[in-house]
Amino acid sequence: MDFAAFDWTIYWFMFPVAILVATSAMLSGIVCAAMFGPIFLMIFTLLGPEYPFESLAAAIGVALFTEVFGFSSGFVGYYRKGLIDFKSAVPFIIVGVPIGIVGAILLNVLGEYEEALRAAYGILMLVLFWVIIKVHEPKEDMAKAQAAAGESVASGEDDGRETRTITGRDGTTYTYKAPRQGKGAAATGLGAFLTGLLGVGIGEVVMPQLVKANKVPIPVAAATSVFTVIVVVASASFTQISALIAHGGINAVPWNVVVYTIPAVIIGGQIGTRLN
């Protein structure tokens, strides 16, 4: 690796920014790349000609690569809290991993249509904005729905699903019915595909399915979503970075950004899980 080819100070500001991004991601269960993408693709362009990455694939690849470390840090925090429902994450992972890899492969194949992909990314972010702001249930309504789900569990109402209990390290016990993916598998597949292709999607579809469709308590849902995101994003990230190196050599990866974002998201991951 030719370290002299990089300006190692130009992206210093990404250290505090990445801490904030990772903290927010841990609190919401939404992928870091949903916030890194706009920074890399739009903010960097506004800063000057020396800041933008050489390609969309490099921007998405770095966003996913960084995210793996941030969510891994969050995973450790949630694991210590005892909040992850590994069994519930399996169906989402089975659907998400192979489709996420396909999306990552297609990004490099469709590199010649970069402007169209950038436009698609912008549209996707607007759609996600609407979903998160408009479709999200008010906190009071969500609390009522989860209370009703808890009453269903307590009354022994049988809908064919097993009852699961998660006890956190702080002694809080969460009881709920085992989540069903059902028709949500299509949303999971789409989210995984968009994650591999454009860097966002999987966290945004898994978290709502757990909380809104299955009434899983928010702390357990966030922890389980983080674990699911790690596995899917790691698969897509490995594919993206490998493709970048295969096409442009080791220097095709902007390591002078990664050197700031990776340690920052590790810190942010721990902050986010503590605040949750």
Image (cartoon, rainbow, N blue to C red):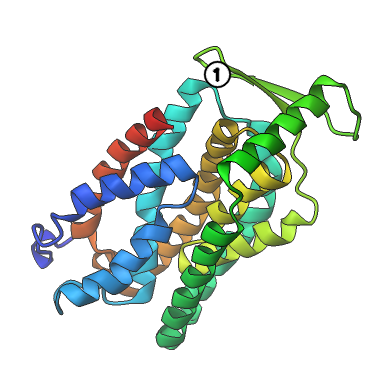
- Give, as a three-letter code, the residue at label 1: Gly
Taking the spot 73% from the left edge, 41% from the top edge, the residue there is 214
Viewer-proximal residue among 23 and 104: 23
Query: Label 1's element?
Result: loop
Taking the spot 32% from the left edge, 72% from the top edge, the residue there is 41
Q: Position of residue 121 (x, y in %)?
A: 46, 74
Q: Is residue 118 above or below residue 100?
A: below
Q: Position of residue 129 (x, y in %)?
A: 49, 64
- Side of 187 relative to 113 (left or right): right
Viewer-proximal residue among 51 and 177: 177
Report the residue that reaches farthest toward the top: 171
Quadrant of the frame with the N terminus: bottom left
- Side of 270 relative to 34 (left or right): left
Label 1: how many residues lie within 10 Å, few (<14), some (14-19) or many (20+)? some
Q: Is residue 221 above or below residue 254?
A: above
Q: Quadrant of residue 174?
A: top right
Q: Which residue is mark 1?
A: 168
Residue 153 appears in the figure: yes
Quadrant of the frame with the C terminus: top left
Q: Quadrant of residue 172?
A: top right
Q: Is residue 123 above or below residue 13?
A: below
Q: Position of residue 10 (x, y in %)?
A: 10, 62
- Side of 5 relative to 43 (left or right): left
